[in-house]
Image (cartoon, rainbow, N blue to C red):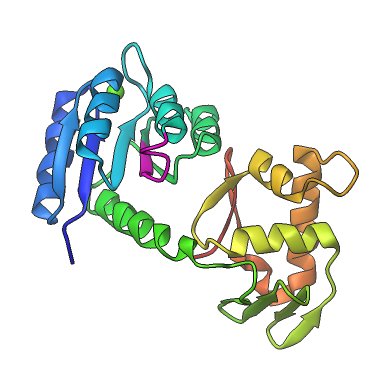
Amino acid sequence: MSKERILVVEDEEDILALVHYNLVKAGFIVDTAVSGEEGLQKALQARPDLVVLDLMLPNIDGLEVCRQLRASSNLSEVAIVMMTAKGEEEDIVKGLEYGADDYIPKPFSPQVLIARIKAVLRRKMPEKCDRNETPIVVHDLTIDPRRNRVTAAGKDIDLTVSEFKLLSQLAAKPGWVFTRTQIVDAIHGEGYAVTDRAIDVQVVGLRKKLGTCGIYIETVRGVGYRFKE
Ligand code: CA
C-alpha cells in the first residue's frame, strides 16, 4: 500500500512539532504549514490525501481554509480533520457544514489523532460505491433503500418517509457526525419546511420506533447526530 500524504496546518509550533513527529512515526508522509495561506499553497503543491487543520489560525482561519479547499476543483475530495479548542462548538458545526470530515478537540493524545485520521481515510474509500441501491446493514439493523424497508433486531419497522431518510443518512456513514442543517438538507423536498427543532423531535421518535436499535443514533452535544460506529 502506498503511503498516505498528510498536510498539517497549525500556527502553534509545539503542537505542530508533536503532530508531525507522531504522524511520521505512524508511517505517513507529512508536510507542514504554519498559516492558512501557506496551508492552501502547500495543499495545491503537495496534493495531500488528508489535511489536519487547526481552526484558530491568523489571517485566513481554518474555516476559510476548509471552504477554499472544498471549492478548489483539484482538492475538493481531500479528507479534512479539524483541530478545535474548547467552546468552539459553533465553529465545529460550521466546519462540518463547509465539508470537514471529522474534528478532534484539543488537547488530544497523538494516538487518538492517528486513530481518527486512519478512520477518516478508511471511510473516504467506500463512499465511492453506490450506496443508493445496496441495503445498508449495521449491527442488527438493515435498511433497504430500494424497498424503503427497515428491519431492526429481526422486526419490520414502519417509518415515515422523513424518518427513513434521516436513518439512511446517518447509517450510511457510521461514526460520521452530521449537523442538524445537513440532516435538514437531506430530508428536504417533502413540501414543508424542516427546522432544527423538528429534527430533534424526529430523532426521539425514530429511536423509540427502533426499540433496542435506538441506541445506535447518538447525540453529539452542541453539534448534531451520528450513527454508532
Ligand atoms: Ca492555532
Query: Looking at the picture, how far across and down is residue 148, in whole percent?
Result: 78, 73
Query: Is residue 107 in sight in this rendering?
Result: no
Instruction: Please name the residue shown 34% across and 11% down the image.
Output: 59
Question: Of helix, strand and loop, which mostly describes the magenta segment?
Answer: loop
Query: Looking at the picture, how far across and down is residue 173, in whole percent?
Result: 53, 61
Q: Left or right: where does residue 117 sit relative to residue 165?
A: left
Query: Is residue 89 in sight in this rendering?
Result: yes
**188 over 3 or under it: above or below:** above
Q: From this viewpoint, which residue is outermost toward the top?
A: 59
Q: From this viewpoint, which residue is outermost toward the bottom?
A: 154
Q: Left or right: where does residue 192 sit relative to residue 187?
A: right
The region drawn magenta spans 73-82
Instruction: Please name the residue shown 38% across and 19% down the image.
Output: 61
Instruction: Please name the residue shown 9% across and 52% down the image.
Output: 25
Identify the image quadrant of residue 168.
Answer: bottom right
Query: Looking at the picture, how far across and down is residue 155, in whole percent?
Result: 76, 86
Identify the image quadrant of residue 11.
Answer: top left
Image quarter for ligand 1 equals top left
Residue sitting nearer the eye, 134 or 137: 134
**Was residue 133 drawn as part of the magenta stretch in this picture?**
no
Residue sitting nearer the eye, 139 or 194: 194
Q: From this viewpoint, which residue is outermost toward the front?
A: 73
**194 over 135 or under it: above or below:** above
Query: Looking at the picture, how far across and down is residue 188, in whole percent?
Result: 78, 45
Residue sitting nearer the eye, 215 or 65: 65
**24 over 34 or under it: above or below:** below
Quarter of the figure that contains the N terminus: bottom left
Q: From this viewpoint, which residue is outermost toward the right?
A: 191
**Was residue 76 drawn as part of the magenta stretch in this picture?**
yes
Instruction: Please name the residue shown 40% across and 62% down the image.
Output: 125
Q: How many marks?
A: 0
